Amino acid sequence: MTDQADQSRRNFLYVAAGGMGAVAAGAAVVPFVASMMPAADTLAAAKTEFDVGTVEPGQLVVIQWQGKPVFVVHRTEALLKQVDGHDEMLKDPNSEAIPEVQAEWMDTPEKRKYRAIKPEYLIVVASCTHLGCIPLFKPTPGRKDWGDSVPEDWPGGWHCPCHGSLYDISARVIKGSPAPHNLHVMPYKYLSDTKVVIG
Amino acid sequence: MLEKLMQTRLFKWLDERSGAEAIIKSQLTEYPVPKNLNYMWNFGSLALLVLTIQILTGIFLAMFYKPSAALTYGGYTVAFDSVERIMRDVNFGWLIRYMHAVGASSFFVVVYLHIARGLYYGSYKGPRELLWIIGVVILLIMQGAAFFGYLLPWGQMSFWGATVITNLFGALPVVGEFLQQLLRGGFSVGDPTLNRFFSLHYLFPLLLAAIVGGHIHALHVVHSNNPEGIDIDKKDTIPFHPYYTVKDAFGVGVFLTIYCYIVFFNPQMGGYFIEVDNYTPANNLQTPPHIAPVWYLTPWYTILRSFESKLLGVLAMGASLAILFFLPWLDRSKVRSSRYRPVYRQMVILFFICVIVLGYCGHSAPTPTLKLVGQIATGYYFLFFFALLVLPKFEKTKPLPDRV
Amino acid sequence: MKLKSILFAGLMAASLVAVGPAQASEGHGVELKHAKVDTTDREQLRRGLTVFTEVCMGCHSAKYVTYKNLMDYPELALSREEVDELRGDKPLTAGLITDLSPEDAEVSYGKVPPDLSVMANARRGGADYIYSILTGFEHDPEGKIPDGNYNLYFPGNRIAMPDPLSWLDHDEADTEMLEQQAQDVAAFLAFIADPHQNERRALGFWVVGFLIVLTIVLYLLKKAVWADVKH
């Protein structure tokens, strides 16, 4: 009888100690895993401020945001016109396939087309959505400047050198490209007329 | 619980391919341990625990630490900056670093008590000579690993500690300068030294892990000594599991409580675990007013300082560690435990006090009185070992019991 | 059992004896003044920050503390506006770095003022030492060291830092205010030397508490398992 009582007491203590030990071990894992996540100084550098006024009309600038390349294009009137007239060539003309290609401020068909808060300044992540290469900027339409690296009816935009993906001047992917989606947009807002903060 | 686990099909599958059941039986559930071990026998498992903590926290610290003495703003260096980044920006970096720093000191507390246990109960005597020798190798590698690690934050104590100790090697005749440059990779302690010390600081614990495996293997061949120091009758043994697993687990609980109290509430331990001067970046043009190694190396530092001649000091320090290897043959008494050796018991207790006195002297700024005290303690340190040679001739040991 | 306890008592007593005088002998002969600092007191830390930016930062830096840290550390929790005012056109991620160049400092004071990020850890006495130094400027009783360079608490008494709070010959009525400023900045420096210290202690309370309970359970388990072993 007492033997049995002892036995059950012992079993209870085994379970209690084992349970608490497991909790302790689990808790001890937390700081180690957490330490591998981005540190405070890395997070502090997660926002980039940039003055788009420094980009000349028609020019493309690649800046860094969170260690990734970002395109900033100052689109002239002529370049903005190149956005229209080839919707049937695009996989996702209205940028709605996945969350990464749209933003809260894309609230009109106009903005979905230009993919920019201010149409003249396009700001997108410069990584091809296929495998992450940086596409080449080939803004003029047709093959005149680019040879047969682009199709005959090239509307002007980007050509990825790795696997030949094509994007138009709003960074929307053209049908037949290996890339599945338009170039991603990242959160950004204007602090003043030309100052933007990205991230 | 273990029994139930061993009934599962998964375990059966594993057993057929690894012989797991035989290992578990011979090493745990049927491994015989004397039933009369006291709590001084807990420090072996605790040392294994601390080694694990050190390796784990060390691997994570190495993800953030940068071994470079390149200068940055304000007289700091890339290495110092990376340590401060760990303390400030890395998630829980402060916890991991304090665990590592307090762990270093804890390792020595635990291992010194483990050695003291061995000395007091004669665990170094036959048939456990090899077990003891492997243990001394572990001690030396630990001291090396701790010394390499202390350079890494590249503070004033790091720099001057490394300078002083690499100079010791320079005192040796003929090979001195060669050894010194080999260690430093330059003409003084500098960037190349820091880089190689980091590499060695990562290597040594891995060596330790392997050698600790050998230590445990050697133990399981000759089995544990016990407080009576007599050979144990089979009837007086109990299986390691569950008896000593739960006893060791209780020891782990006590240890972790104290360890975590220090980590969370007093990680610098008033300058004993992390020295105050190590928060000043290394400066090769200015020595701190008072320089002493971390507490666990101070006894040997006193032995070094007790001699007028630099070479003699270095040799004495080396001898004080090397002599431990020969202990099983210096002490020829057939009786192991101090319980039955009245004279040895007085001698070994005095030896413990003497090591503590040596540690105190090494930690304090040198004064003529302390120097004399240190010399007397150094003298006794060596006298202890040589007196063991003649001790059995006149020590009247008490009669040993047949059973515990 | 008896031998063991004697051995233990001996070791403990000896180590206590060893630790006691070792710590006492590390002072500079003069006992430091005790600073009333509380690194969880937001008001004191903010007052200390003000003293730091308005007085200390004339010459010293705290490069490991960024402007953004001043917002993010809950102990300080400055607003974005307050930080913007402090930093001017310096980036949010910049450290608190003085405008005095090291070269100019060397010319003016003979040495480069040390960075204060970890100063509270780098001196024996920590906050007490900082407080004592700031309120330790006196006239050299021997008249050798010029006024402003004599400090009662500085090792060797000759300090390169000129009396930052104008403690020497201050108006009797200002004593309390100056002492408060010195303690506030000592609190701030003690905080930034180890900015996760309050988080650490709060977490430690739970960790140690949990371990004590676990240890008690393990003790009971040990006793229960060993109940059938006869000694």
Image (cartoon, grey):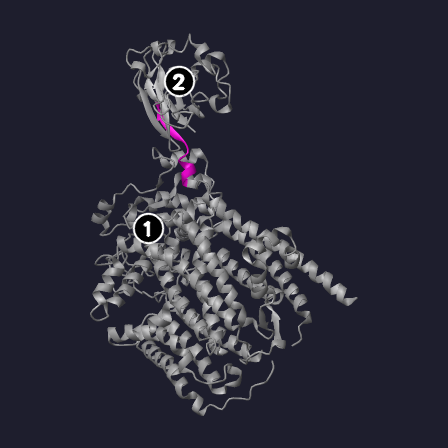
- Amino acid identity at mark 2: Tyr
x%, y% of residue B66?
34, 48
State whether residue C187 appears in this view: no
Quadrant assignment for the N terminus of chain C: bottom right
Q: Is A45 a magenta residue? A: yes
Q: Is residue B324 above or below residue C176?
A: below
Q: Residues within 10 Å of mark 1 (few under 14, many from 20)?
A: many
- Amino acid identity at mark 1: Pro
x%, y% of residue C27?
37, 65
State whether residue B331 appears in this view: yes
Distance Cα–Cα, label 2 vs label 1? 45 Å
Determine whether, in the image, residue B344 is placed left or right of residue C88. Answer: right
Residue at 50% x, 82% y: name it: B338
Residue bearing mark 2: A167
Viewer-closest of B377 and C142: B377
* Res B279 → quadrant: bottom left
